């Protein structure tokens, strides 16, 4: 965990740590975790708030996302790429959790029990999350940037200005992408 007395690292410092870690420097990896933990936790918190059916808390989601990222091969272009991957990881963790819960509820080897209203609500939310995930995958095949804008909005919790900086586009471009993406998602989810 980062020390509250230390200033937040700059984007350049984070990019340097990512590159050092990619080159095999495990001390840089530890410094990176300390430097980005609060931001990853904030992304996870926004993701949990945007997905009310999520059974993971923000801290659990942040830890799981970091564990997945730290356990994989490091191939980071820069800070922006790293945080895009964090948003993708939080989305995938929620999708994996929803799939697991649905599989278990449909007899994945568990003893059958009656469903309460809360269980039925959780199952509906899991199914909605999976439909959203599939729709985003379809949109990504057609227009990757619009899908990324939606992903970073819903699963990364970025606002319009943050999106514009992260994607190196203007705020009006983000606004257009959001309008189009939301309309496309609405049609895809209703159909």
Image (tube, rainbow, N blue to C red):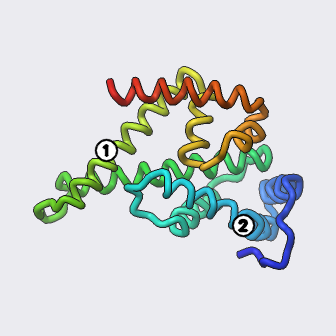
Question: Foreground: 138 or 44?
Answer: 44
Question: Foreground: 100 or 190?
Answer: 190
Q: Is residue 106 above or below residue 147?
A: below
Q: Residue at x 72, y 27 (%)?
A: 172
Q: Residue at x 55, y 23 (%)?
A: 180
* 185 left or right of 114 in image: right
Identify the residue position indicated by label 1 in the image: 127
Sequence-first disc among 2 and 1: 2
Q: Which x, y percent locates residue 158?
A: 65, 47
Q: Residue at x 62, y 35 (%)?
A: 149
Q: Secondary structure at mark 2?
A: helix
Q: Which x, y percent locates residue 28?
A: 81, 66
Q: Quadrant of residue 45?
A: bottom right
| Quadrant holding the C terminus | top left
Q: Which x, y percent locates residue 105?
A: 21, 56
Q: Is residue 24 above or below residue 138?
A: below
Q: Secondary structure at mark 1?
A: helix
Query: Label 2 to label 1, Cα distance in Å?
Result: 33 Å
Rendered image: mark on residue 33 = 2
Q: Which x, y percent locates residue 43?
A: 61, 56
Q: Is residue 142 above or below residue 121?
A: above
């Amino acid at each position: 965990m980062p020390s509250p007395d230390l200033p937040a690292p700059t984007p350049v410092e984070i990019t340097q740590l990512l590159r050092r870690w990619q080159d095999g420097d495990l001390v840089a990896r530890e410094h990176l975790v300390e430097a980005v933990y609060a931001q990853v936790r904030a992304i996870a918190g926004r993701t949990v708030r945007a997905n009310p059916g999520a059974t993971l808390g923000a801290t659990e989601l942040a830890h799981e996302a970091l564990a997945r990222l730290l356990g994989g091969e490091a191939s980071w272009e820069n800070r922006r790429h790293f945080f895009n991957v964090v948003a993708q990881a939080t989305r995938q963790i929620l999708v994996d959790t929803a799939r697991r819960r649905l599989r278990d509820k449909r007899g994945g080897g568990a003893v059958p029990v009656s469903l309460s209203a809360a269980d039925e609500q959780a199952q509906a939310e899991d199914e909605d999350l999976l439909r959203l995930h599939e729709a985003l995958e379809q949109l990504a095949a057609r227009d990757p940037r619009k899908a990324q804008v939606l992903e970073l909005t819903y699963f990364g919790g970025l606002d319009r200005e943050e999106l514009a900086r992260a994607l190196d586009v203007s705020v009006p471009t983000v606004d257009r992408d959001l309008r189009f993406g939301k309309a496309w998602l609405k049609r895809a989810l209703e159909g």
